[in-house]
Amino acid sequence: MLDQSEQMRKSVPRAAFVDATRTCDTVVCLPTYNEGETIGPLIDAILRLPVNTDVLILDDGSPDGTRAEVETRAASNPRVGLIGRPRKLGIGSAHRLAWLHARRLGYARIVTLDADLSHDPADIPRLLALLDKGADVAVASRFAPGGRLDYRGFRLFVSRTANFLAGALLRLSLTEHTTSLRAAKLDRVPPGLIETIDHDGYSFFVASVRRIVRAGLKVAETPIHFHDRQKGKSKLPPIEIVRGFVTLLRLARLGDKAEPFVALPDSKCVCPSCKLPYCVPSGAGMRCLACPGD
Ligand SMILES: Nc1nc2c(ncn2[C@@H]2O[C@H](COP(=O)(O)OP(=O)(O)O)[C@@H](O)[C@H]2O)c(=O)[nH]1
Ligand SMILES: [Mg+2]
């Protein structure tokens, strides 16, 4: 049973905040929304890996205790950091923020993955090894030879179809376009290439991999076994599946107005609402990735 003050703390949305420092050159980023059952064991597993990384959780005000799990670990380990946003703002926008934050703090490498244990943290060293061997970006693939995907039924159909269509329509010479487990060398990816992607939902993944390949970066894939989640619920609403297919068709037909920007000094990126330096150019103005701006 939660006591009353703990329940209050969990139910009151806090303003956007950043509680993270850099202790090494690689950061592993985990966007979360209601992953209270898996986030703790996942952080512990990443900290035990034979590679030295910080772990950054980007949580969108999860009401299920995810934050408390992170805060307990962050309190005793400077390698664990937390960015909190006041409410659910989308998986794509959390990834954009992760990239911007990693650049701001001067990391050399970023790794991203899901927090529901569908991605095995033991695959992280393999992705980093691909960067060491010369790749600019390493992509974990469920569809490369040796890869596995545990989905069944409709989810399997959607995943296979999305990846087949992405391959056929975008012609990127990859086998995987939609999963988040990736690693990259930040100095090889032009500043703004990822942060300015105008998709806050799941379409972010296909749009970002397209920009990465189009920018001429050296991409290497490695097969993975993707597990269906055992705890918690998927946050992928059916409308996002439709959006994903529309995004694919738009990218194939119209391309993408990539607007990489030269990194602006922090002072020019401060959000008038949350006061954090995480605004990026968007259309004619600026848009904050850390808060809804209201
Ligand atoms: N910060 C943040 N994380 C999200 C959001 N939506 C999904 N996630 C996280 O993104 C990861 C993948 O989401 P999931 O629901 O497992 O998608 P699925 O695997 O496609 O069903 C998980 O770690 C989620 O908690 C969001 O709006 N904000
Ligand atoms: Mg999942």
Image (cartoon, helix red, strand yellow):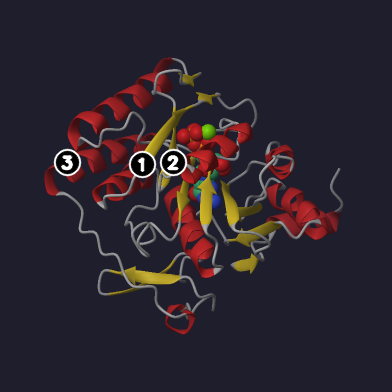
- Residue 251: percent from the left, percent from the top? 20, 45
Towards the viewer: 11 or 288: 288
- Residue 292: percent from the left, percent from the top? 47, 65
Image vertical order of residue 205 relative to residue 18, above or below: above
Query: What residue is shown with label 2?
Result: 138
Q: Nearer the viewer, mark 1 or mark 3?
A: 1
Towards the viewer: 280 or 224: 224
Query: What residue is shown with label 1?
Result: 219
- Residue 150: percent from the left, percent from the top? 51, 18
Is 274 displayed left or right of 49 in the figure? left
Is 110 displayed left or right of 192 in the figure? right
Residue 82 in which image quadrant: bottom right
Image vertical order of residue 2 relative to residue 103, above or below: above
Query: What residue is shown with label 3?
Result: 252
Q: Are marks 1 and 2 in contact (CB under 8 Å)?
A: yes
In the structure shown, which secondary structural element does the residue marked by tag 1 occupy? strand
* Residue occupying the far top of the picture: 153
| Mark nearer the N terminus (1 vs 3) | 1
In the structure shown, which secondary structural element does the residue marked by tag 3 occupy? helix
> Is label 1's Cβ within 8 Å of ligand 1?
no
Residue 280 in which image quadrant: bottom left
Q: Nearer the viewer, mark 2 or mark 3?
A: 2
Q: Residues within 10 Å of mark 2 (few under 14, many from 20)?
A: many
The amino acid type found where label 2 is placed reads Ala
C-alpha gap between disc 2 and disc 3? 23 Å
Q: Are marks 2 and 3 in contact (CB under 8 Å)?
A: no
